[in-house]
Every structure is written in C-alpha cells, then in structure tokens.
Amino acid sequence: MTTTIPATMRSAVYRSPGVVDLVEAPMPAPGPGEALVEVAFCGICGSDIHFILEGWGQPDSVHGHEWSGVVVAVGDGVSEWVVGDRVVGGPSPTCGVCRPCRMARPALCTERGTPGTGVSYGAFATHRLSATDELVAVPDGLDLRGAALAEPLAVALHGLTQGGNPGPGSRVYVAGAGPIGALVIAALRARGVEDITVCEPGSLRRDLAVALGASRTVVPDDLEVPPMWEPMRVVDGAVDVAFECSGKGPATEAALAQLDKAGTLVLVGAGIDAPTFVLNRILLNELVVTGAFEYDADGTEAAVELLAAGAIPTAALLEPGSVGLDDLVPTIERLARGEIAGKVLVAPNPGGSHE
C-alpha cells in the first residue's frame, strides 16, 4: 500500500496558559526505528486541561497522548510495520534493568522522564513520529474512533491492578466520573463488578455513570465522613476499594472515609489540591493508600483486546463526532467547566477517511 504524504504537517503548539498556536511545519521523515503516523483521532485527557489551561505544560510542546492512526512511512530497517497498518500509541520504552522494571512496574522505570517536565511532541497534530516499539496494532473489527480509548483505558486497568483487581462480589466506590472515572466504571463492569457507587457533582456525568453501569450515584454532600475523633467508625455501605479519579483534595479525603476495614484507596486522578488524611483512620483500620501511574506492563495490549471484544461501551463513552485542531482550546474550556460529559476526540485531519 502506498500513500501520498503532504509536504507539511499542522500542529497545535502550546505557548502559555490557554494559548495554542496552529503551526505549519515541514513534514518530518522517519529515521531508523521510527514510523510516521497520520493521526486519525486523539482524545482530550484531563491532563491536557492541566497542561494547556492551567500552565502545567512546557512552552512549545504539542500535547495529546490518547491517539490512533495509520502508518504512512517507515524508516530504514523497519520491518515490523508497513504503510497502512492501523496503530495506537503505547508506552515509551523502558530500560528493563532497573529495580522497578525487574519488579514488572514499567511506569516507574528510573530511566524515563517525568511527564510535563520537558517539551513534548504529541498527537494534537496531523502527523507524528513514533518509535516503532511504542506502537500497538489495532485489530480488524475495531475502528480507529474506539481504538483512541486504548491509552486512557490502560490507565483505568492499571488502577484496577493497584486496587487488587476487584471482581464479582466486590464493593467499589469511584470518586469523579470524568473520562478516567468513566473508564474505571466501564472496566469494573467488564470484570463483573456490580456494586459500584459513584460520587460526581455534575449531573451530566452522573447520568453517564448510570449509563455505564453504576449501581448508585451520589453528590459530595450525600457522603458520610466520620469526624477525626471517630477514626475507627465504618460508614454504612462501606466499600472494599475506592478509586479517586478527580484529583481533588476534599474528594480524596471523603473517598478514604468510604472504605471498610482493610480497604484500599487508589489515587488515579492527577491534581495539586492536596488532601489531609486522618492518619489514625488509616492506622487503626489497616487501610492501604496507593497511587496508579500509567499502565500495567501489558496494559495497552489488554485495553485494545477489551475494546476489540466489545466489552467496553465506546458509544456511551465517546462524545458524538469530533472537533478539529482549531476548536481544541474552546473544547478544553468547555470540558473544564463540566459542560461535556464524555470523551472528546480531536480529528486533526478533517474530512479524512477515518471519520
């Protein structure tokens, strides 16, 4: 298969909080071990809101890491991928020899950089260069719209791993029904979990949580949070595992209070709004508090398999249609205001054959 590659590519380049320039630049050529991918879709992540609106990003970066696309060129010596292959972006390579790598914790590899600390070149662009070992194949039967959920679903699956992989019979609480919280709910349902309480202040997202299979939705004011002088008291309807997906300090404090004895709180949502924990509640009830950063070792492949099997309700999770690069910042602003419940996909190549 051959394809005509334009002489230039268009990217949304972050400059300062809320300011993105659309830049036309020469099309890069893939080198050895690289592939040039035409981006079909790139989801807007909660971290993109932090990077682009709140100034977490590095100037001159191109954000966007939840993408699917088609290989349009490969570098010298590349044989594992050919033009026309449909792919999603997987994790960046790890060293394989540091202590976290040897423990099968690739997200913690000591040789990898910290997200947001350097200039990034993501997929809010018509094309992107990728190392070939970062690519994961999209199987027949899975369209590229659905495939764009692979990266955030891999994040949700890693959260489940950190929470002990709850299954049928588990009682679970999810704080925040944004994109990651929604995928946690969907992944829990795919694992056979039925008892899922979701706390979400926004009505649109509460409706989405119900559509995804939440057994109960509440708003923050509905929650019982025992005072600090009652650290051993367990609330009615206490859960085995709580997933905090909002990144908000008060939500994290309330999530801890929803745990039964020996329960686990998994911090999935990124944020800088620090919580204050009741330490005696953790100590006296032998609670576990852990983080979930990025993916399991096979997380992207597992996510693609679930999506291809139809185990994840992509139609409910994805907002209809897509937006172009021109509408990136206004759409991120709407997401930040809670006006959109589902995952928004950016289509950098409007009118392409992927839509």
Image (cartoon, rainbow, N blue to C red):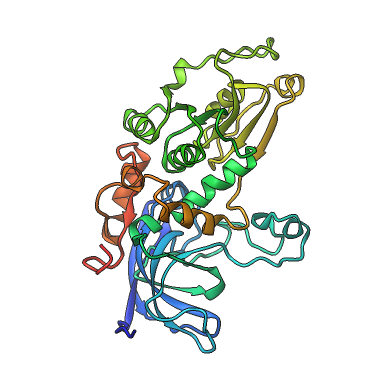
Up the image or down, 345 lies above or below 247; here it is below
Front residue of 299 and 293 = 299
State the image coordinates of residue 70 (x, y, percent, origin top left): 38, 72
Front residue of 112 and 206 = 206
* Residue ranking furthest to the left: 351
State the image coordinates of residue 192 (x, y, percent, origin top left): 50, 36
State the image coordinates of residue 106 (x, y, percent, origin top left): 66, 58
Quadrant into which the C terminus falls: bottom left
* Residue ranking furthest to the bottom: 76
Up the image or down, 127 lies above or below 343; here it is below
Up the image or down, 88 lies above or below 264; here it is below
Quadrant into which the N terminus falls: bottom left
Please tell me which residue is depicted at 69% across the width and 59% down the height of the picture: 109
Residue 225 in the figure: left or right of residue 64: right
Note whether residue 182 is visible. yes
The answer to which quarter of the image holds residue 316 is: top left
